[in-house]
Image (tube, rainbow, N blue to C red):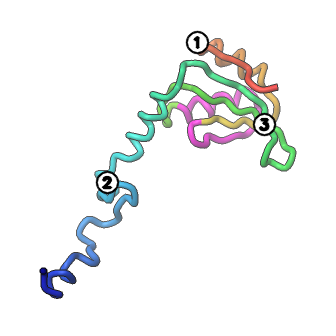
Amino acid sequence: MASLRDQLGGLVYSTEHGKTCPTCREALDTCRCDEVGEQARLAALDGVVRIRRETSGRKGKGVTTVSGIPLPSDELKTLAKSLKKRCGTGGAVKEGIIEIQGDHRDTLRQELSALGYQVKLAGG
């Protein structure tokens, strides 16, 4: 049996690596969790871009969501910016889904079809 000194002799606190990732416990500058998550998100897509109108959780305000675009997050933000400019409204990118304020399903369908994506209107 190990002595009490050996049992309590583990590392308690260290500033050697700076801040660490809570998931993989690596230093933030060497952490690959975001890249692995992004690759998993892109692998799960089926190639169909879905456009739907949602109001749930937004106090009755409608937004148009665009999901299933097979682009990395940086290019997705650039595409969202051009779509927001085309619709003349605001919006955001959250977890790989583009949210455009208001009901712009037809405009977004035309724009994304022109860019070469297979588009499907989802929902009612």
The boundaries of the magenta stretch are 76-96
Q: Secondary structure at mark 2?
A: loop
**Residue type for callout 2:** Asp
| In the depicted structure, whether residue 24 falls above or below residue 37 | below
* Residue beneath the point at 85% across and 50% down: 59
Q: Nearer the viewer, mark 3 or mark 2?
A: 3
Q: Amino acid at mark 1?
A: Gly
Q: Secondary structure at mark 1?
A: loop
Figure quadrant of residue 27: bottom left
Q: Estimate the spatial distance between the alpha carbons at disc 3 and disc 2, rounded to whole Å.
A: 37 Å
In-front residue for pair 68/105: 68
Q: Which residue is mark 3?
A: 54
Mark 3 crowdedness (10 Å alpha carbons): few <14, some 14-19, many ≥20 = some
Q: Amino acid at mark 3?
A: Glu
Which is nearer the N-term, disc 2 or disc 1? 2
Mark on residue 116?
1
Residue 20: x and y, percent?
34, 62
Viewer-nearest of labels 1 and 3? 3
> Which is nearer the N-term, disc 1 or disc 3?
3
